[in-house]
Amino acid sequence: MDNQKVKKYHLHIYHARQCDPKKCTGKKMARFDLARLFDKVQKIPRGSILLDPMAEQALSPADRNEQNITVLDCSWETVEEVFPQLLRLQLKHRALPYLVAANPVNFGRPFKLNSVEAFAAALYILGNKEQAEEILSKFNWGHTFLEVNKEPLEDYSKAKDSKDIVRIQAEYF
């Protein structure tokens, strides 16, 4: 992939308006035109990769052909209301592998990524490190996410498929 043009992904956020607007990374990304916010599940583009922590398949470089990545920005208390609606859409549910949060709210906690960290992880794994760096650059702690997770992200980005991601992830537990 060295001499090929790196694909830029379209980033989408289902925003349920349940977070503190001052801390919401999704809203900030939308202000910088780095992602599109939707308040209706039906507006999520069909065929989009949905970063879903409960998905049976891990995101891997094998998912590179998709154009759209979607994150849910809603409270865990209401996620059970949202997921049945999502199952009716034609989305590719993918879980992110083991990574550690670097945001001020959940610093150092595994799997507690906020929206921008989830997008950055997905972009890195899918081979667009530049876009990952670009979206994180809008947050003063953003570079820390890549520093803290550099080794696993590099390993995940070299995986061939979901099974390979799961195998690599096991090395970090």
Image (cartoon, rainbow, N blue to C red):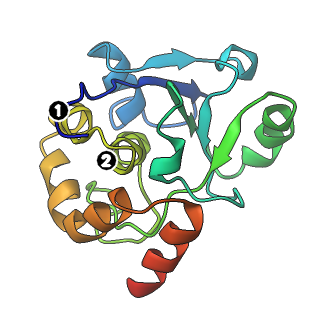
Residue at the image position 31 percent from the left and 67 percent from the top: 155
Q: Which amino acid type corresponds to the residue marked 1 in the rendered image?
A: Asn
| Left or right of 148, for residue 76 | right
Q: Which residue is mark 1?
A: 3
| Left or right of 142, for residue 171 | right
Q: Position of residue 56 (x, y in %)?
A: 72, 61
The number of numbered badges drawn on the structure is 2
**Quadrant occupied by the N terminus:** top left
Q: Position of residue 172 (x, y in %)?
A: 38, 83
Residue at the image position 40 percent from the left and 20 percent from the top: 35
Q: Does 93 sit above or below residue 112?
A: above
Q: Which amino acid type corresponds to the residue marked 2 in the rendered image?
A: Tyr
Q: Position of residue 93 (x, y in %)?
A: 68, 45
Q: Does 133 sit above or below residue 8?
A: below
- Residue count near mark 1 (Cα–Cα under 10 Å), binned few <14, some 14–19, many ≥20: few
**Quadrant occupied by the C terminus:** bottom left
Q: CA distance from mark 1 to mark 2?
A: 17 Å
Residue at the image position 57 percent from the left and 35 percent from the top: 18
| Left or right of 85, for residue 147 | left
Secondary structure category for the residue under label 2: helix
In front of the other: 71 or 166: 166
Please indicate, yes or no, whether residue 173 appears anywhere in the rendered image: no
Q: Earlier in the sequence, mark 1 or mark 2?
A: 1
Q: Which residue is mark 2?
A: 124
Q: Position of residue 87 (x, y in %)?
A: 84, 38
- Residue count near mark 2 (Cα–Cα under 10 Å), binned few <14, some 14–19, many ≥20: many
